[in-house]
Amino acid sequence: MKIDVLTIFPEFFLQIFDFGIIRRAKLAEIVKINVHDLREFTTDKHRMVDDRPFGGGDGMVLKPEPIFAAIEKLIGTAVRDDYPAGTKVVLLSPQGRPLRQDLAKEFADVDSHVVLICGRYEGVDERVNETLVTDEISIGDYVLSGGEPAAVVLVDTIVRLLPDALGSDTSAENDSFSDGLLDCPHYTRPAEFMGMKVPDVLLNGNHAEIEKWRRGKALEKTRLNRQDLLEGEKGEM
Ligand code: ADE
């Protein structure tokens, strides 16, 4: 998988992809991540990446020209219908489709080329969205100052789902959300810590009982913190 990030703050990403699973995936050449400074794609003297909104209002809007130039360079064309198969151009914005585990799974394809455009909170010229973007994605119902943290979140959720990115094949299957529930609690040694004991069932080696306990705890946690995840599943409860 190849990921290109387009941003006006390239320094934001200096180390952020150099830890843990993402670093390992990069070293194993499961994914290649490149960060590009949008300013490099300007052609005017002042290297302007943004301008005031037509119609008035606060803040600045990212200009279309540098983004079109960047897409042309990175993909080979700025015509959406001519993108090679497996190409995704994502605009990170609070107006996008909400990022959920199933959406991350759709993106986790080793052969694809994903270009992430980090918007600013005031906005991006809508012609970018209308003609270049294949997916507008939001990481949640809150407003960030820019799409950079959202791009990091999206890259992390996708890369950990790529085959061989995680140490063991089963770890992603047991994640929260992969079966529509939150994850169950986990414990490690010591079995007793400051008088607090690990549940007995986890120590007795009975795997069927452990599985049942985990499912029960996952349900309990989901009921407590995310009732909304259970609404669609009522029939099964
Ligand atoms: N940019 C600003 N807010 C955002 C959000 N919630 N998700 C994605 N990109 C954003």
Image: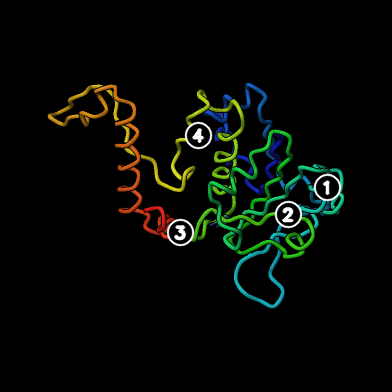
**Residue at x 79%, y 60% (from the top left corner):** 131
**Residue at x 50%, y 24% (from the top left corner):** 168
| The label number, if any, that marks residue 232 in the structure image | 3
Q: Which residue is under mark 4?
A: 172
Q: Earlier in the sequence, mark 4 or mark 1?
A: 1
- Residue density around tag 4, few if under 14, some if 14–19, many if 20 or more, within 10 Å: some
Q: Earlier in the sequence, mark 3 or mark 4?
A: 4
Q: Which residue is under mark 1?
A: 83
Tell me which amino acid carries mark 4.
Ala
Q: Nearer the viewer, mark 4 or mark 1?
A: 4
Q: Residue 174's quadrant in the figure?
A: top left
Q: Nearer the viewer, residue 225 or 23?
A: 225
| The label number, if any, that marks residue 134 in the structure image | 2
**Residue at x 76%, y 44% (from the top left corner):** 87
Q: CA distance from mark 2 to mark 3?
A: 28 Å
Tell me which amino acid carries mark 2.
Thr
Which secondary structure lies at badge 2? loop
Q: Position of residue 200 (x, y in %)?
A: 20, 28
Height in image: 81 above or below 192? Answer: below
Name the image quarter holding the N terminus.
top right
Q: CA distance from mark 3 to mark 1?
A: 36 Å
Q: Position of residue 157 (x, y in %)?
A: 55, 41
Question: Pointer 1 and pointer 2: residues touching (CB < 8 Å)?
Answer: yes
**Residue at x 21%, y 31% (from the top left corner):** 199
Q: Nearer the viewer, residue 77 or 61?
A: 77
